[in-house]
Image: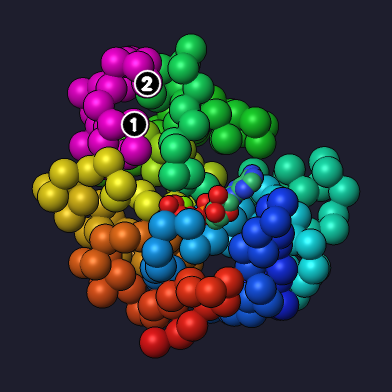
Amino acid sequence: MLQAKGIYKRYQQRQVLKGVSMEVFCGEMLAIVGASGAGKSTLLQIMGTLDQPDEGEIIFQGEVIHRLAKQKLAAFRNKRLGFVFQHHNLLPEFSAEENIWMPALISGEAIDQVKARARDLMERLGLAQIVGQKPSQLSGGEQQRVAIARALINQPDLLLADEPTGNLDQKNASALHELLLELRKTYQQTIVVVTHNQELARLADRKMTMSEGVLIEH
Ligand SMILES: Nc1ncnc2c1ncn2[C@@H]1O[C@H](COP(=O)(O)OP(=O)(O)OP(=O)(O)O)[C@@H](O)[C@H]1O
Ligand SMILES: [Mg+2]
């Protein structure tokens, strides 16, 4: 589904990515692990075309995507990718439910359809009680689950999740693991997840470690 070829990325004096090459296959859950600061989020942002590599290519379903024009790229991301950011980036002035609707409304879908799908996701993520609350009125774990529902609302081809269990307690983390596994099984959802959570990494189909600016497969 997605290929990264020879990705290099430098921030000031620091060469963070030193020729990362990898492939994400349709329907799999791939876990990326590695020490803090190793470059996992950097790679995920580049895979999701939110950041540009200094060198290398990102190929999505056969198409070189990172060089698409800005507007095309935004539409591509909106329709094909779902993001769960490490810092969940919810819009503070909107309710939980409205945050979840946002990507679908941006893509021009009718509100009734969007509402129904959002309700279903919220139900499954244990968020039914907090639909009307603003992000500042939610716990860290609830905010994270809202971010996950938002990432899934457009039924993306590829879900990119950066430490989705970071703020969750054991119970909610396990529920999220189950949800990810269910998505993969029921909808053949392709998932790339960056995680420090050993259990989640173990549940994945494949695990890769970011180390010294390259990815190593186990
Ligand atoms: N916008 C930026 N400007 C300068 N340096 C950056 C920027 N983004 C990341 N870095 C640096 O790149 C390195 C890799 O950061 P990255 O966020 O990819 O790490 P990570 O593996 O996701 O770590 P963590 O597990 O703590 O989230 C770090 O040393 C970080 O300071
Ligand atoms: Mg990170």
Which numbered circle lies on residue 143? 1
**Label pair 1/2, CB-CB below 8 angstroms:** yes
Left or right for 3, reference 147: right
The kind of residue tagged 2 is Pro
What residue do we see at 36% from left, 60% from top?
Answer: 195
Residue 137 is one of the magenta-drawn residues: yes
Residue 200 is one of the magenta-drawn residues: no
What residue do we see at 49% from left, 83% from top?
Answer: 216
Above or below 126: residue 7: below
Q: CA distance from mark 1 to mark 2?
A: 6 Å
Which residue is situated farthest in the front direction here?
Answer: 13
The kind of residue tagged 1 is Gln
Nearer-the-camera pick, 120 or 98 = 98
In the rendering, at what x and y percent does residue 168 appear?
A: 23, 43
* Secondary structure type for disc 1: helix
In the rendering, at what x and y percent does residue 218 appear?
A: 39, 87
Left or right for 180, reference 54: left
Left or right for 202, reference 101: left
Q: Quadrant of the N terminus?
A: bottom right
Which residue is situated farthest in the top direction here?
Answer: 93
Badge 1: few (under 14), some or many (20 or more) residues near its Cα, within 10 Å?
many
Q: Quadrant of residue 102?
A: top right
In the rendering, at what x and y percent does residue 49 appear?
A: 69, 54
> Magenta span covers which residues?
125-145
Nearer-the-camera pick, 194 or 100 = 194
Between disc 1 and disc 2, whose residue precedes? 2
Q: Which residue is mark 2?
A: 135
Q: Quadrant of residue 62?
A: bottom right
